[in-house]
Amino acid sequence: MSVHNLDRVFHPKSVSVIGASDRQGSVGSALVKNLTGWEYPGNVYPINPHRKTIFGIPTVPSILDLDPPIDLAVIATPIAIAPRLIRECARAGVGGVIVVAAGGKETGAKGRELESQIKTEAGHAGLRIVGPNCLGIICSKSKLNASFANRTPLPGKMAFLSQSGAICTAILDLSIKEHFGFSYFVSVGSMLDVDFGDLIDYLGGESDVSSIVMYIESLTNFRKFMSASRAVSRVKPIIVLKSGRTPAGAKAAASHTGSLAGEDAIYDAAFKRAGIVRVKTFEELFDCEELLAKQPRPRGSGLAIITNAGGPGVMATDALSDYGMEPVSLAPETIGKLEKILPPYWSHGNPIDILGDASPERYRKVVQVCLDATEVNGLLIMLTPQMMTDPEGVASSIATVLRGKTYPVFTSWMGGTDVEKGCDILNKAGIPTFDSPERAVRAFMDLYHYSVNLEMLQQIPPKLPRRIEVDQESAKAITRGGLQRANNVLTEPESKALLSAYGIPVNRTEIAVTVDEAVTKAREMGFPLVMKILSQDILHKTDAGGVQLNLRNEQDVRTAFEKTIAGARAFKAEARIEGVTIQPMLEHPDVELILGAKKDRDFGPVILFGLGGIMTEVLKDQAITLPPLNRLLARRVMEETKVYRMLLGYRNRPPANLVLVEEILIRLAQLVTDHSEIDELDINPLVLMAEKGCAVDARVILKPSQVPAPFHLVISSYPNQHETHTVTEGGVPCFIRPIRPEDAPLLEELFDALSPQSVYFRFFSPLKALPHSMLARFTQIDYDREIALIALNESSSHEQMLGVARLIRIPGDSRAEFSIVVADQWHGKGIAAALFKRCLTIAKEQGIEEIWGIVLRENTRMLALGRKFGFSVNRIPDSLDYELKIDLRKL
């Protein structure tokens, strides 16, 4: 349901408390006190059939007794009567309800049934539910404290969302001590309706939210969460503490991939893909929050460290080293300025040790030099209490200098009672304080990683040298056959045939049922050879003695056949043995890799890459990512492993064909995208030799899927079904398809070909070039949220983008905004009409009901196109521009 009615929840004109009370210590009492004690400008209606007034406010027996529609209701009664109360709220036209009571699904079957009843009653009326089992919500902008927290936060621009009420109250208490605040403070509870994805979508559009911090125990609607996070993290930092990091929930699986890809690692990969910064502890979460609340984000990793003692400077340097970083090298100009104001025995480098007798004035001057240094992107100021040190005076001195700084400045006043007053001065001045250099550096690096994530999200992936073409029908036939078996396991030849259908290179593999057949096929194939057992019941062949290497003549083949069959029977007497496979032995490979896929219950298919061969499970050098993939994403997962260094070449070994490995990963991702029945898949090893590579062994386990492809993915994939070839009304042959990240260069060429007037009509401003961030935004789209079609010229010898049409959906809404632009030289050729027609068709298929857009009055071509397609064209009040609108339900 997404952002529907959330404005009425967070900015209500009226609030009712059902189960309001004046009994000391009750939830109903705390809610009324909080609502009336923070200058909330709206009306508060206590509802209690047994009281006439509560804290001097008249009560009513039921919400149905109130005349005006109520925006928000807070239910403070036991959860057992919540379904009836929700039904009454729906009848009264309430926008949203907060259910604070526990006793839902966390208690078992009875609680799940209660939650089901609540959801049914709310769903009929579009009523939003926060909770149950939650603390409530607080919104600084609307002066709303609809919670039973014993504190009200300071105002700020950070949003905090938590599944735990206890974490909420702890964070709230600490934030007041450290003097930073929040714009939104939300306890989500059991997330029966409103969940993290909804809130990220809503807060992403709120101007008084600069960052989002979350405590997560579990997720619901994973695809919506990923979609919202990927959209919002591009403009606002999202920081997450996800509890439950141990592998207890991950079950060992039959394949290598299944046992290697643990649950928490998948969360890590998902957060990384969504641009989310993940922290590990409550302390780290709070530190990151404080830095976010008080300081701008770093533009780079250049950290300068000021200290009055050598030891703390070394500690800060070591902490940076743990992240693979060093303190920034100070420019000669900066060194020269410091020489003039510091004693001769200062450190002459970074960390800047200004000595134990440093006065407030010395601190202030050094801080000013660092603030003026262009190489510095962050400043850590440290102090230890010494006989000559004035912690309070230093704090007061630097607090005045640090106003209006453009990069993060933070402090570590190390000690106890001697530094308390100094810390208080700094906190009140909006300067974060940490009790150790390690905590300070960690918080800085968390924010720096967000900047790195953002940069990575906006990188433009290069195209592959060749187009990805697959034989989807052959692959479907193989998976259908596998699903008809009891164990749903494909044999090695079948697994390789499936890979081959998607263009993944495999080595030649022949089946032999008898020893004579094995000898004949070996003679045809040539030596040396490898023989493997062929059995659906033996997944790990080596464990059963089912792999015989380096067979160099016919006698070797005969001996190996007998040994392989005997070993398999001894290993598993009941196993069905179908024979053996014969394949060429690839001697002296450069590198052996493992590639795999596992279908996670929540995140869908997960791709694994790492060191392969017999040492796979011993060294466990692997990384995981989520499909779909492009070259950039494929390269990143490779870079996260140690084996990647081998692929770059070392000593006398040449570099591997990295583009080939990228292509194989992309093809593997496409395979699991198109076939939701693939539960686990192993390629181990994938052998690389010179410029070539091939899958030497493969194993696929299937499982019937309740969700058809590609909706089993947690990230929307490229919608091939929207591709079409057409000839426009002006006779131009076009290939119309969804835009891809790799299309950025084509879009840039299109923009460069636009006249200043066309640019102004499209962007409502005189852009001279597309900024990189905008180029990434326009090409790296979420296909769940946006329809963006391009028209390519099919009569040209090279790829040429003629125009782009775009429909952007409002999250959780049935409306979408349109835009369209066509290269000037192609005006009047029917390009815009062809794109627009295709967009409208797709919009109807996706359930979009209304399309609208703003058109400048001078853009007569667009106004005419709108009228042609049946749009209403109306002048915007107090404006010379027009709004075009169409109801697709009437078409």
Image: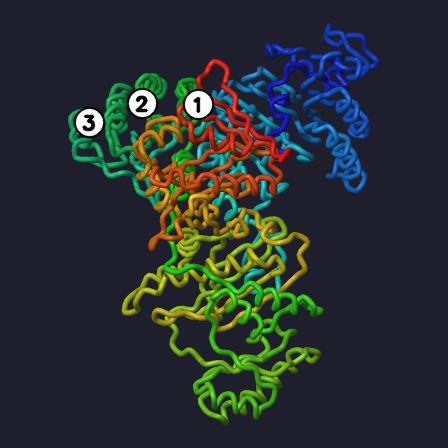
Q: Which mark is residue 389?
A: 2
The percent position of residue 17, horizontal first and vertical second, equals: 72, 18
Q: Amino acid at mark 3?
A: Leu
Q: Give the residue at mark 1.
A: 417
Image point (79%, 23%), residue name: 88
Relative height, residue 531 to residue 311 (above, below): below
Q: Secondary structure at mark 2?
A: loop
Q: Amino acid at mark 2?
A: Thr
Looking at the image, tell me whether mark 1 or mark 2 is earlier in sequence order: 2
Q: Secondary structure at mark 3?
A: loop
Residue 449 in sight in this render = no
Relative height, residue 132 to residue 739 (above, below): above
The percent position of residue 656, horizontal first and vertical second, equals: 35, 65
* Left or right: 69 in relation to 768: right
User: Residue 342: which quarter of the image?
Assistant: top left
Label 1: how many Cα within 10 Å (few below 14, some 14–19, many 20+): few
Label 3: how many Cα within 10 Å (few below 14, some 14–19, many 20+): many
The percent position of residue 847, horizontal first and vertical second, equals: 62, 39
User: Residue 771: which quarter of the image?
Assistant: top left
Image point (54%, 29%), residue name: 871
Q: Nearer the viewer, residue 839 or 660?
A: 839
* Left or right: 62 in relation to 631: right
Tell me the CA gap for discs 3 and 1: 28 Å
Q: Which mark is residue 342?
A: 3
Image point (60%, 40%), residue name: 844
